[in-house]
Image (tube, helix red, strand yellow):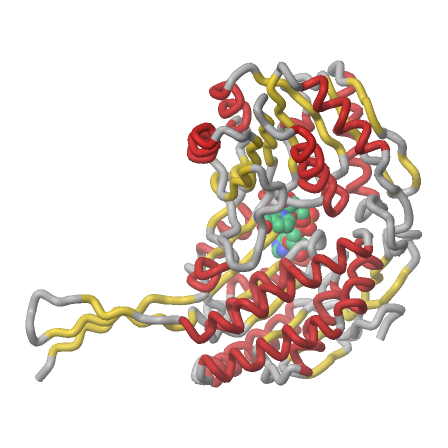
Amino acid sequence: MSQVEAPTQAFIAGSWLETGRTFEVRTPIDRQVIAQVADCGPEEARRAADAAVEAFAAWKQATAYERAAVLRRWYELMMQHAEGLARTMTLEMGKPLREARAEVRYAAGFVEWYAEEAKRVYGEVVPSQFPHKRLLALKQPVGPVFAITPWNFPAAMITRKAAPALAAGCTVILKPAEQSPLTALYLAKLWEEAGGPPGTLQVLPAQDPVPLSEVLISDERIRKLTFTGSTEVGKLLYEKAARTMKRVSLELGGHAPFLIFEDADIEKAVEQAMIAKFRNIGQSCVAANRLYVHARIKDAFAEAYAARVRRMKVGNPLEEDTEVGPLVDERALEKVQAHVEDARKRGARVVAGGQVEGLTFHPTVLVDVAPEARILQEETFGPVAPILAFEDESEAIQYANRAPYGLAAYVWTRDLSRAWRVAEALEYGIVGVNDGVPSTPQAPFGGMKYSGVGREGGKWGLEEFLEVKYVSMALP
Ligand code: NAD
């Protein structure tokens, strides 16, 4: 155990193992080392692959009711350990404690939902044109899965993959982000306590993700790769996975537009744009990165928004009322600073925030941002909101769809016809209409264009871990 309640060894084939090598996990709060975690490489990857294959044979044969019972118990344990999980997340990646608590509920929500849905993996009987034939479409688990997750939602990004995979009858080898292995190991401990059989869920922390991933991606027995992270890495892994023809799901970067029309409820739009932008200190793939406001109300909106942003409580993320704490690491801070500096050089004005203390970048609002500024092209992944103007609906849609990404978009209007038109025209996998927080376990989550391939959540998330087997049966 480390300074937090989580284990620090790798979890392979149902055992907690030292690997002879460790790496440091440092908290962004004061950069102190909070744990030394077992470092896994190719050897551990091979061992885990063998165990995942062996465990798959039995896990896929277990009844859906048996799998559902383990998932349900896992959910209950996560809720019992909510405070420990939340503190672990806050310590390892710096999100405010109250947001970490909300993430535990969200993460556990996937486990609860898939515990129920495990029992509803139905096949179909297809009518035949011949009286003696019966055509059946059966659903079967795809096989052992390799999952790679990011640090920004250390619990939810894991359960959103592992819960449907395990419900479907797949086994999972998880490589968590090097910044946040402790939450992953904590979840594995709870899976063990819930009665998850050895080899069904394994966690392999690694300082360098490449050597271990190479082994698992090139292993033909691993039938699926599911990845959440940057578009850059996603593209690389997509190519590699093609060589063994794996099923692939990719949840990648985003650059969400937040459109506010002149008839919107401004007060609500301000409040929801606060959450959509500053949740997780802006380190979210669905973060509202470009606030486009109708020209007639832009100044009023910017003023109200900046006033609200200036009131945000900046501080230690372990304190109850903190809304903005440190960014995850130095590299993240440098990127945010570079984006703000670049926008400034091109004429942008900072109307709130802009200060830096340690790893904390104060929540910031920019106006007069030039269209070619980096902050409008690339994910900033930090607490900076650029406010821009549009003249009419078609211009708003054009601006919104300009990004190469297509994950989440938001629309604020009281006009129902416009809400439909704009929602349909946006090239995004998720659209929040007068809703800044659309994500929920039972709904499909995923992107178009450079934001990825496939969906997580709801029945769609389960399909990602199922094969369809067609059986044509002629009656003798
Ligand atoms: P990242 O791509 O650098 O890392 C993500 C994971 O991939 C980590 O576990 C990392 O160790 C691993 N990784 C990195 N290079 C690898 C390689 N060559 N081979 C194998 N594994 C490798 O991303 P990040 O900085 O950790 O996370 C932030 C990114 O994730 C942002 O772009 C964000 O938008 C995206 N994200 C997307 C979603 C979504 O659902 N679409 C959700 C959360 C985060």
Say which of 96 and 193 sits in front. Answer: 96
Q: In this rendering, is residue 299 above or below 44? A: above
Location of residue 294 in the rendering, given as x and y in whole percent from the top left corner = 60, 19
| Residue at x 54% of width, y 67% of height | 113
Say which of 442 and 14 sits in front. Answer: 442
Q: Quadrant of residue 341?
A: top right
- In the figure, is residue 400 to the left or right of 355? left
User: Which image quadrant: the C terminus?
Assistant: bottom left
Total numbered circles: 0
Say which of 349 and 269 sits in front. Answer: 269
Location of residue 155 in the rendering, given as x and y in whole percent from the top left corner = 68, 62
Q: In this rendering, is residue 290 above or below 300? A: below
Q: Residue furthest left?
A: 131
Location of residue 378 in the rendering, given as x and y in whole percent from the top left corner = 64, 32
- In the figure, is residue 56 to the left or right of 286? left
Q: Quadrant of residue 433?
A: top right
Asked whether residue 211 appears in the rendered view, the answer is no
| Residue at x 87% of width, y 42% of height | 313
Q: Quadrant of residue 85?
A: bottom right
Q: In this rendering, is residue 53 above or below 355? A: below
Asked whether residue 37 appears in the rendered view, the answer is yes
- In the figure, is residue 404 to the left or right of 152? left
User: Which image quadrant: the N terminus?
Assistant: bottom right
| Residue at x 23% of width, y 71% of height | 136
| Residue at x 82% of width, y 47% of height | 329
